[in-house]
Image (cartoon, helix red, strand yellow):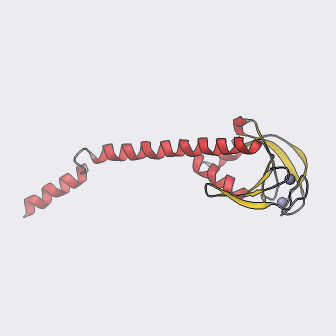
Amino acid sequence: MQCPRDAVALIEERHEGIEVDHCPSCNGRWLDHHELDELEARAAPDENQRRATIVYARRESELACPVCGKLMWAFNYRAYDLELDTCEDEHGFWVDAGEEGRIRDVMEERVRGLNRAASAEQAWGEFLRGAGGRSMWDQIGGFFRGRRR
Ligand SMILES: [Zn+2]
Ligand SMILES: [Zn+2]
């Protein structure tokens, strides 16, 4: 793939499990569409809510998609004031140098949010199981099993 800004060949990189194609010349980065979409899906499981909030200030970009060569759309990503270019055929996202650190901040912030949600869920589950590690139903089941013996 070639950089949409300067046509230099992009170099594949991995950032914490996310595949990114990096331009060694302008330091821009290309993200596969599904990578960002997967993060979005986990952060906001309601598809309609997600689609409604992900994009605003959409306008025509001067950059062509490195996958299909079509002119891309520029847009702002959520409330983070992050400017991205994307292909309408969902080939990916272009992130200019300087924006890249911020998109990683956004992702890390969202992943931290997910971890918080997961640990809250775990704490709730532990609470429901009770301090003895047995649920009410285990205790009732044990009671009846005990009576039958
Ligand atoms: Zn470049
Ligand atoms: Zn495309």
118 on left or right of 132? right
Image quadrant where one finds the N terminus: bottom right
Ligand 2, by image quadrant, is bottom right
Tally the marks: 0
Residue 12 position in % (x across, y down) = 74, 62
Residue found at x 54% / y 41%: 113
Image quadrant where one finds the C terminus: bottom left
Nearest to the observer: residue 105 or residue 36: 105
57 up-or-down from 65: above or below: above
74 up-or-down from 89: above or below: above
8 on left or right of 137? right
125 up-or-down from 78: above or below: below
Asked if one can make out residue 75 in the rendered structure from this viewpoint, the answer is yes
149 on left or right of 121? left
Q: Quadrant of residue 101?
A: top right
Residue found at x 61% / y 44%: 108
Residue 103 position in % (x across, y down) = 70, 44
Residue 71 position in % (x across, y down) = 90, 54
Residue found at x 81% / y 46%: 96
Nearest to the observer: residue 113 or residue 16: 16
116 on left or right of 109? left
Residue 33 position in % (x across, y down) = 73, 57
Q: Quadrant of residue 130?
A: top left
Asked if one can make out residue 52 in the rendered structure from this viewpoint, the answer is no
